[in-house]
């Protein structure tokens, strides 16, 4: 079982000091994909004139923009970092940059594909987003008393970039790892093989704390990540079991596999099942007719 972390003290628009170098302001955009809302992080010293970085400004929401400006008052924003281009993370980056005097927006290159295989979900892309600086894996961003390392973590999105706060051995994990839920991996841009490789990479780094964009911090990092990974392997085994029992379509599998999950999440769950099936097809364990898509028929080889 994944040891989910769901309880924490917060209020919308309030600036909370959550570590010596980190403050968080949560946007009022709760939902089935965002939990309590988007948590925007401010990295740097809380003293007048200090230079800080802002991570994941969040959705296009004037009230959240005003809350961030209040939280930043008296300090200088030197960098705005975006983990990926989904619309609960990226859209406010440009209005915030303009409001603070033109701070550069940094993110990975645009996604390789459309993020979702069917219909618009709450996590659809902000197609208007264009960073000022395109980040690459391992790139360092130095600030006023802090250093951040860009860490490529594809899987949830092909352009997902987590950010390592070297000064606190912490990782801003975006949507790659969340304490309140598993992560949606939605083809064609989401990729289960890439996601599993990224999980292993994060585990190997030995971080003390993970700061997801949605929900509270994860402090028991290694056990949590191992359980997260084991859950994916278990889900793969469950999919193989459904195929062995006679299910041929994703529509047949999802009600059985996700019976205890909010039905509003079933479209996203269908995409995660598809991502597992694509991986199984690539490994030669499963066949898809005519090809591995949502509407295909699947069988064990």
Image (cartoon, helix red, strand yellow):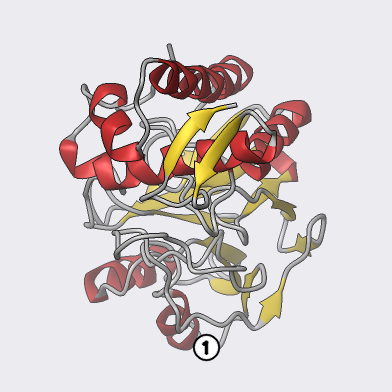
According to the picture, the residue beneath numbered tag 1 turns out to be 101
Give the residue displayed 65% in from the left and 51% down from the top: 163
- Place of residue 58 in the rendered image (x, y in percent of width and height, measured from the top left): 38, 64
Give the residue displayed 29% in from the left and 64% down from the top: 119
- Place of residue 14 in the rendered image (x, y in percent of width and height, measured from the top left): 28, 53
Q: Nearer the viewer, residue 222 or 123?
A: 123
Kindly give the residue lying farthest to the left in the view shown. 263
Give the residue displayed 18% in from the left and 34% down from the top: 262
Q: Is residue 82 left or right of residue 196?
A: left
Q: Is residue 167 left or right of residue 12?
A: right
Q: Quadrant of the C terminus?
A: top right
Q: Nearer the viewer, residue 50 or 176?
A: 176
- Place of residue 35 in the rendered image (x, y in percent of width and height, measured from the top left): 28, 42
Q: Secondary structure at mark 1?
A: loop
How many tags in the picture?
1
Q: Quadrant of the N terminus?
A: top left
Q: Is residue 183 visible?
A: no
Q: Nearer the viewer, residue 253 or 259?
A: 253
Above or below 148: residue 92: below
Q: Nearer the viewer, residue 200 or 170?
A: 200
- Place of residue 263 in the rendered image (x, y in percent of width and height, measured from the top left): 17, 37
Kindly give the residue lying farthest to the top in the view shown. 1
Q: Is residue 122 left or right of residue 284?
A: left
Q: Is residue 292 visible?
A: yes
Give the residue displayed 37% in from the left and 65% down from the top: 124
Q: Quadrant of residue 205?
A: top right
Give neighbour class at mark 1: few <14, some 14-19, many 20+ (Cα, 10 Å): few
């Amino acid at each position: 079982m994944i040891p989910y972390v769901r309880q924490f003290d917060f209020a919308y628009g309030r600036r909370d000091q959550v570590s010596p170098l980190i403050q968080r302001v949560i946007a009022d955009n709760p939902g089935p994909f965002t939990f309590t809302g988007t948590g925007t992080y401010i990295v740097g010293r809380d003293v007048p004139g200090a230079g800080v970085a802002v991570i994941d400004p969040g959705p296009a929401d004037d009230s959240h923009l005003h809350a961030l400006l209040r939280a930043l008052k008296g300090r200088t924003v030197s960098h705005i970092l975006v983990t990926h281009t989904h619309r609960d993370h990226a859209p406010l980056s440009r209005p915030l940059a303009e409001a603070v005097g033109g701070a550069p927006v940094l993110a990975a290159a645009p996604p390789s594909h459309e993020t979702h295989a069917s219909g618009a979900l709450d996590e659809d892309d902000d197609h208007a987003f264009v960073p000022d600086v395109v980040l690459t894996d391992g790139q360092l961003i130095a600030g006023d008393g802090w250093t951040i390392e860009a860490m490529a973590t594809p899987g949830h999105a092909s352009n997902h970039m987590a950010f390592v706060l070297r000064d606190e051995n912490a990782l801003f994990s975006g949507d790659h790892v969340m304490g309140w839920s598993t992560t949606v991996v939605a083809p064609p841009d989401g990729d289960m093989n890439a996601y599993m490789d990224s999980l292993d990479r994060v585990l190997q780094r030995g971080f003390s704390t993970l700061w997801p964009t949605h929900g509270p911090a994860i402090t028991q990092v290694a056990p949590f990540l191992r359980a997260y990974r084991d859950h994916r392997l278990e889900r793969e085994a469950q999919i193989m079991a459904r195929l062995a029992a006679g299910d041929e379509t994703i529509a047949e599998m999802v009600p059985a596999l996700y019976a205890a999950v909010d039905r509003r999440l079933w479209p996203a769950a269908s995409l995660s099942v598809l991502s597992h099936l694509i991986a199984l097809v690539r490994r030669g364990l499963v066949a898809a007719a005519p090809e591995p898509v949502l509407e295909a028929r699947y069988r064990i080889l």
